[in-house]
Amino acid sequence: MKKIDKVIVQGDNDDTITLKPLIEHILTAEEQAQLTPEEVINSLKEGNQRYATNDLTARDHTEQIRKAANGQFPKAVVLSCVDSRVPVEDVFDKGIGDVFVARVAGNFVNEDILGSMEFGCKVSGAKVILVLGHEHCGAVKAAIGDVKLGNITAMLEKITPVVAQTDYKGNRTADNPEFVHMVCINNVLATMNQIREKSPILEEMEKKGEINIIGGVYDMDTGLVDFL
Ligand SMILES: [Zn+2]
């Protein structure tokens, strides 16, 4: 059987089709070692542009699964909220072996997430940590509303200090999109600072220029990430 190496991605009309190469390459240790944090950030930004313009890379997952089985050399760690509307790999047009993804409602850090980030960067060579918040975040809104429910109560206590620290004179409720937006951004910035404060390993790697710790907010309407 002939191997498929291109896929049809667009038919402009009945007479024309566009063929896209099917990518089966997986990042290697050598490629990862040569990447700079700046190049990885550009790769995330360019991937996000492709996502937002419906131009995702066509990947041969069967081949990539096979090639990735013997090791992984991802270029970044992304900390995202659990929100189902933020498909992290797609948002940055990344595939198998490209990014570590940690997810927790409200994209904050604790000991376990920090350990995962240290594993991703110090042990496995990732060059960027991206803290990714998003608009209309239920966890941020629940923290603003001081929701109490089961284990959610303790989880939201990681976010409520940011609510209190957000300097805003107007309507400080979850019904006010402007306030929710401000808390969302401040939560990303606070998480970036906590990574530096609570992980001497990652702080030192950033000071040496081995990694960059950056933040972004995903826009639900456009699919674009506003890099902070
Ligand atoms: Zn969320």
Image (cartoon, grey):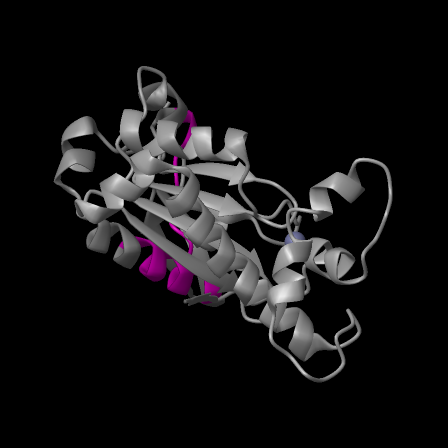
Q: Is residue 135 above or below residue 172?
A: above
Question: For the view shown, which residue lies furthest in the bottom direction?
Answer: 170
Residue 57 placement, left or right of 140 = left
The residue depicted at 75 percent of the width and 62 percent of the height is: 144
- Report the quarter where the C terminus lies: bottom left
x and y percentages locating residue 3 in the rendered image: 34, 29
Q: Is residue 49 above or below residue 61?
A: below
Q: Is residue 127 visible?
A: no
Question: For the view shown, which residue lies furthest in the top direction?
Answer: 70
**In the image shown, does 214 or 57 lie closer to the viewer?**
214
x and y percentages locating residue 218 in the rendered image: 53, 62
The residue depicted at 36 percent of the width and 26 percent of the height is: 63
The residue depicted at 51 percent of the width and 37 percent of the height is: 102
Residue 42 placement, left or right of 159 = left
Residue 29: image quadrant is top left
**In the image shown, does 139 or 92 lie closer to the viewer?**
139
x and y percentages locating residue 212 in the rendered image: 28, 50
Ligand 1: image quarter: bottom right
Q: Is residue 199 visible?
A: yes
Residue 27: image quadrant is top left
**In the image shown, does 59 or 175 lie closer to the viewer?**
175
Q: Main secondary structure of the magenta part?
A: helix
In magenta, the rendered stretch is 43-62
Give yes or no for residue 54 being in the magenta stretch.
Answer: yes
Give yes or no for residue 145 being in the magenta stretch.
Answer: no
**In the image shown, does 3 or 169 lie closer to the viewer?**
169
Residue 82 placement, left or right of 191 = right
x and y percentages locating residue 32 in the rendered image: 20, 36
The residue depicted at 36 percent of the width and 34 percent of the height is: 4
